[in-house]
Amino acid sequence: MKKILILVFLLSLSCYSQTISIEQIIDIEDNDGYETPSAYYKDTNNLFDPFVGTYIYNIGDKYLKIVLEKKIHSSLNGYCYSDTMIAEYQYIVNGIKKTNTLNKLSINYSDARFHTIDGVIIYTGKVNGCYDCDVAEKRLRMGIFDSYSEAGGDIIIRRIIVGGQPAIELSLNWNTRGHREGTPLPLQPELKGGSYIMIKE
């Protein structure tokens, strides 16, 4: 009986120790692209917060709405954790809905990267070709995946002021995809690449 109790104690201690993970907290700005096991990439200085909100582009026959949210301590495949910016959007042309992923905002994914748009990278100053940026200005880089066309791309968001109102300049670049000669061209995303000036609601 004593041996059984000792065995149960050792098994429970082993299971308990596996559920504890000591996290190394790393500032999100120090993310070098290499994920450290069990680390927590934290938005220590709340750099993501000014980007949070709902933004609208409504010019001509095109209407684009994007909602940006900050997720705290999201798992990245259970390997490490990160504060993460996520977004979903609605795109309408001539009154016809082309894309609408806004309902995904209410889904609490175990990994924030399951959202249509996500990102953890902050650019500072003139990095990556923003020659008219201030040296301390912060921009947000995010990835986007279009489930209709299965295309992926990059988004860079810069906070600006338009007519006295808070706004963003959203630059969208879809990745180039090849295909074999004689096969159908790959589907293209409904939302075209380019620059969108979007006013904060």
Image: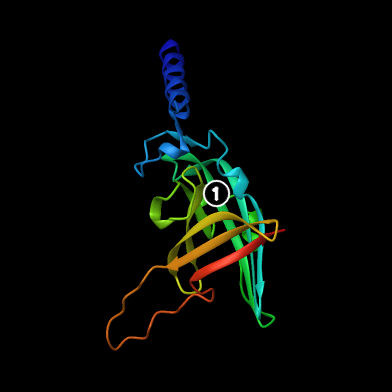
Q: Is residue 150 visible?
A: yes
Residue 13 locus on image (x, y percent):
45, 20
| 187 relative to 53 in the view: left or right | left
Screen quadrant of the C terminus: bottom right
How many numbered discs?
1
| 164 relative to 45 in the view: left or right | right
| Residue at the (43%, 65%) spot, across then down | 152
Screen quadrant of the N terminus: top left
For mark 1, what is the residue?
85
Amino acid at the residue labelled 1: Met
Residue at the far top: name it.
Answer: 2
Q: Residues within 10 Å of mark 1 (few under 14, many from 20)?
A: many
Q: How is the image coloured?
A: rainbow
Which of these two is toward me, 77 or 120?
Answer: 120
| Residue at the (53%, 46%) spot, across then down | 84
As drawn, 104 above or below 108: below
Q: Is residue 111 visible?
A: no
| Residue at the (50%, 50%) spot, across then down | 139
SS for tag 1?
strand
| Residue at the (48%, 65%) spot, across then down | 172
